Amino acid sequence: MATATDRAVGFGLVAFSLVLFAYYTLWIVVLPFIDSAHAIHRFFLPREYAVIIPVVAGLLLLLFIGVFIMVVTWKGRKPAKKSE
């Protein structure tokens, strides 16, 4: 069973993901239809970052997955038998 701490951490992660999804959706879908002089544009980054941030995050994710696979592979190697 999950402890109270596990549930709190899980709830926090889900809440963070929902906030991030809502922010990104507003940034990409809604903001282009709002006049650029409107005050709401102050709360969002320039649109170029809408492409740069996910690409960098994806590349970092692939890098970490590759490093993890390499570490697991190296630790799982059996030492070679020495020939006499």
Image: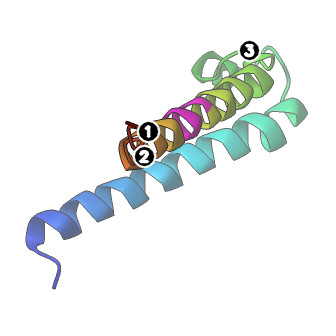
Residue 7 numbered tag:
none
The rendered magenta stretch, by its main secondary structure, is classed as: helix
Pointer 2 local density, CA inside 10 Å: few below 14, some 14–19, many at least 20? few
Q: Which residue is at the far right?
A: 33
Dot in front, 1 or 3: 1
Q: Nearer the viewer, residue 70 or 12?
A: 70
Q: Is 73 displayed left or right of 6 in the figure?
A: right
Q: Nearer the viewer, residue 44 or 3?
A: 3
Name which residue lies at 59% across and 29% down.
Answer: 63
Q: Which colour scheme is used?
A: rainbow
Residue 74 numbered tag:
1
Dot in front, 3 or 2: 2
User: Which region is colored magenta?
Assistant: 63-67
> To which residue does mark 3 refer?
46
> To which residue does mark 2 refer?
77
Query: Decide: marks 1, 3 in contact (CB < 8 A)?
Result: no
Q: Disc 2 to disc 1, how far (Cα)?
A: 5 Å
Q: Report helix, strand or loop for mark 3.
A: loop
Q: Which quadrant of the structure image shows residue 8?
A: bottom left
Q: Disc 3 to disc 2, how far (Cα)?
A: 48 Å
Q: Which residue is at the far left?
A: 4
Q: Report helix, strand or loop for mark 1.
A: helix
Which quarter shows the N terminus? bottom left
